[in-house]
Image: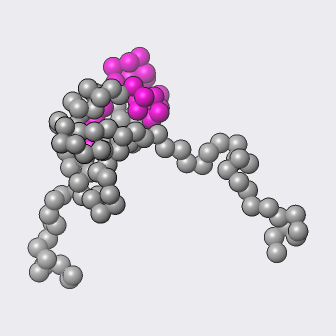
Amino acid sequence: MRGGSHYRPRSSADQPFPLHTTHMRVWQSPEGINWVIDVDLPGSSNAMVIFRHPGQANGRLDKYNWYISTGPEARSVTSRLPKKKIIESLTDDDLARLYRRAMNISRPDPLLPKAASNG
């Protein structure tokens, strides 16, 4: 028994800062698909914008493109663009432009033919 009768599991309110925070938004493509927009791998001048396809079974349909910043922080190699600031600054027009040139995250077909893999 941990801590006797005084043991109480820590709640998120007890944490000095959230252990995991995500900043995402939803954007509708011209095809009518509601993509979840996420930002990953922020650097001093760029970050990966991820278009997550709705539905867990559709992970192979996710896309990405690179957001390039021209702000003053882009000149400092030690700074990092905050994910929240990037998400909040992206307009629907920005997302449409990024989406038009977005690339698939995974290949649409397996690398090996089914017969060559042991499955």
Query: Is residue 44 in view from this perspective?
Result: no
Q: Position of residue 33 (x, y in %)?
A: 25, 45
Please say if 101 is above or below 9.
above
Q: Position of residue 78 (x, y in %)?
A: 47, 29
Query: Is residue 33 in view from this perspective?
Result: yes
Q: Residue at x 53, y 44 (%)?
A: 21
Horizontal side, residue 25 vs residue 66: left or right = right
Which residues lie in the magenta part? 64-89
Please say if 47 is above or below 11.
above
- The residue nearer to you, when weighing 41 against 79, is 41
87 in magenta: yes
Please say if 4 is above or below 65.
below
Q: Residue at x 16, y 67 (%)?
A: 110
Instruction: Assign the C terminus to one quadrant of the image.
Output: bottom left
- The residue nearer to you, when weighing 104 against 91, is 91
Q: Residue at x 62, y 45 (%)?
A: 18
Horizontal side, residue 52 vs residue 78: left or right = left
What residue occupies the far right of the structure in this picture?
5
Q: Determine which quarter of the picture holds residue 97.
A: top left
What residue occupies the far top of the structure in this picture?
72
- The residue nearer to you, when weighing 11 against 110, is 11
What residue occupies the far front of the structure in this picture?
32
Q: Residue at x 47, y 33 (%)?
A: 84
Q: Position of residue 24 (x, y in %)?
A: 42, 41
Q: Determine which quarter of the picture holds residue 1.
A: bottom right
